[in-house]
């Protein structure tokens, strides 16, 4: 099968229930407190009124333009923090004629408040009425618990695998931690408002660009680079609390991404260079030297953040 076909090969996952990993030591609580304090300062900045909002309110007979009750045209730029939960799923590694490995129901960890933090940025455009669009970038993380026993199937380096082992017995690294990165284009719809609270729904699709760090013990070197690994999709529901010059929002996101990436055994550099190298190999139909690896990553994410609002000066109250 050509490399370009393998990029879109579907992977199977089997959800299960696992305990959330517990923090340890004082470092992580301090990081959480710093993140919360930073978000609080940003929220306070978004809540401050400015002269243009007051002038717009006066010009429209005391009704501010683009309110929760009277939505109008506006552009919003925002950022957010959050905490994801990845549903356990199977990890696959295939190297033709040598390895065909499956680790069943990997309990993927996230550590969202450890460096690098879980974060996201977005750009929204609301049209006149209740419909809009959004470009959303999410930077999450995925760790395989290397010391946690798991079920194994298949072969590794030409030898049958035991029914149970620890991932560390076969991997030095197995994670996507400089980004379980998803870039999606979404459609949005505002629901009936509750005072200053504006509920909304959305859904969209896009692509996954994780930074892979996968290092099987039988490989001479690790794969450590940005990669395109397949499609991604998400659905969301949120509550926007509209303040004078911006908004605070809380949101639930359901995301799904199929990872199927090449094991190149190389240390990457910058994102554009890594993408060009992958595209070049794909165009030539070259198979990666160390095979292919991936998983289906299904996630429940709770996020909170702020939006800065830009309303056209010519807009009026509806």
Image (cartoon, grey):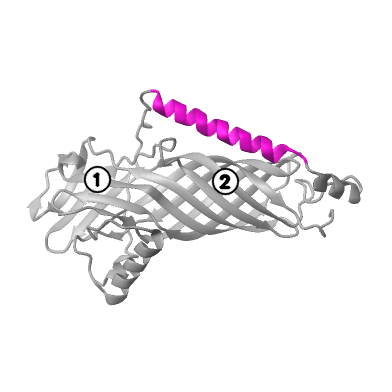
Most frequent secondary structure within the magenta stretch? helix
Towards the viewer: 299 or 23 = 23
Residue at the front extreme, as displayed: 269
In the rendered image, the vertical position of residue 230 relative to residue 28, given as above or below: below
- Left or right of 60: which side holds 24? left
Q: Circle 2 sits on which residue?
A: 79
Give the residue displayed 77% in from the left and 47% down from the top.
67
Is residue 271 visible to us here? yes
Residue 98 occupies which quadrant of the picture?
bottom left
Percent x, y for residue 151? 20, 42
Towards the viewer: 61 or 132 = 61
The crowd level at tag 2 (other Cα within 10 Å; few <14, some 14-19, many 20+) is many
- Left or right of 29: which side holds 51? right
Which element carries disc 1, helix, strand or loop? strand
The crowd level at tag 1 (other Cα within 10 Å; few <14, some 14-19, many 20+) is many
User: How many labels sit on residues?
Assistant: 2
- Which range of residues does the magenta coloring cover? 26-49
Towards the viewer: 81 or 157 = 81
- Left or right of 104: which side holds 61? right
- Left or right of 146: which side holds 272? right
In the rendered image, the vertical position of residue 28 relative to residue 108, given as above or below: above
Give the residue displayed 33% in from the left and 61% down from the top.
10
Mark carried by residue 142:
none
Percent x, y for residue 316? 84, 56
Residue 290 occupies which quadrant of the picture?
bottom left
Q: Does the magenta segment cover residue 85? A: no
Residue 24 occupies which quadrant of the picture?
top left
Q: Quadrant of the C terminus?
A: bottom right
Percent x, y for residue 117? 45, 40
In the rendered image, the vertical position of residue 277 relative to residue 266, given as above or below: below
Percent x, y for residue 274? 35, 62
Which element carries disc 2, helix, strand or loop? strand
């Amino acid at each position: 099968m050509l490399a370009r076909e393998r990029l879109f090969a579907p992977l199977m996952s089997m959800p299960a229930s696992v305990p959330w990993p517990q923090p340890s030591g004082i470092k992580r609580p301090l990081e959480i407190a710093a993140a919360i304090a930073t978000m609080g300062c940003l929220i306070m900045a978004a809540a401050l009124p400015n002269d243009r909002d007051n002038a717009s309110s006066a010009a429209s007979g005391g009704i501010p333009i683009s309110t929760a009750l009277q939505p109008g045209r506006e552009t919003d730029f925002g950022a957010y923090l959050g905490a994801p939960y990845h549903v356990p799923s199977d990890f696959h590694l295939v190297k033709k004629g040598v390895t065909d490995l499956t680790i069943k129901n990997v309990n993927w960890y996230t550590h969202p408040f450890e460096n690098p933090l879980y974060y996201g940025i977005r750009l929204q455009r609301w049209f006149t009425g209740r419909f809009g669009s959004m470009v959303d970038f999410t930077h999450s993380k995925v760790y395989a618990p290397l010391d946690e026993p798991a079920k194994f199937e298949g072969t590794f380096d030409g030898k049958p695998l035991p029914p149970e082992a620890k991932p560390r017995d076969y991997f030095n690294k197995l994670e996507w931690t400089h980004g379980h990165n998803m870039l999606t284009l979404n459609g949005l719809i505002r629901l009936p408002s509750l005072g200053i609270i504006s509920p909304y729904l959305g859904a969209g699709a896009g692509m996954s660009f994780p930074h892979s760090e996968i290092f099987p013990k039988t490989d001479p070197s690790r794969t450590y680079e940005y990669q395109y690994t397949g499609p991604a999709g998400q659905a969301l529901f949120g509550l926007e609390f509209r303040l004078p010059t911006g908004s605070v929002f809380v949101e639930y996101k359901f995301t799904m991404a199929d990872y199927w990436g090449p094991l190149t055994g190389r240390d990457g550099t910058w994102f554009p260079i890594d993408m060009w190298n992958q595209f070049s190999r794909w165009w030539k139909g070259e198979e990666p030297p160390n095979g292919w690896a991936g998983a289906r990553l299904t996630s429940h994410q709770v996020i909170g953040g702020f939006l800065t609002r830009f309303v056209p000066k010519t807009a009026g109250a509806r």
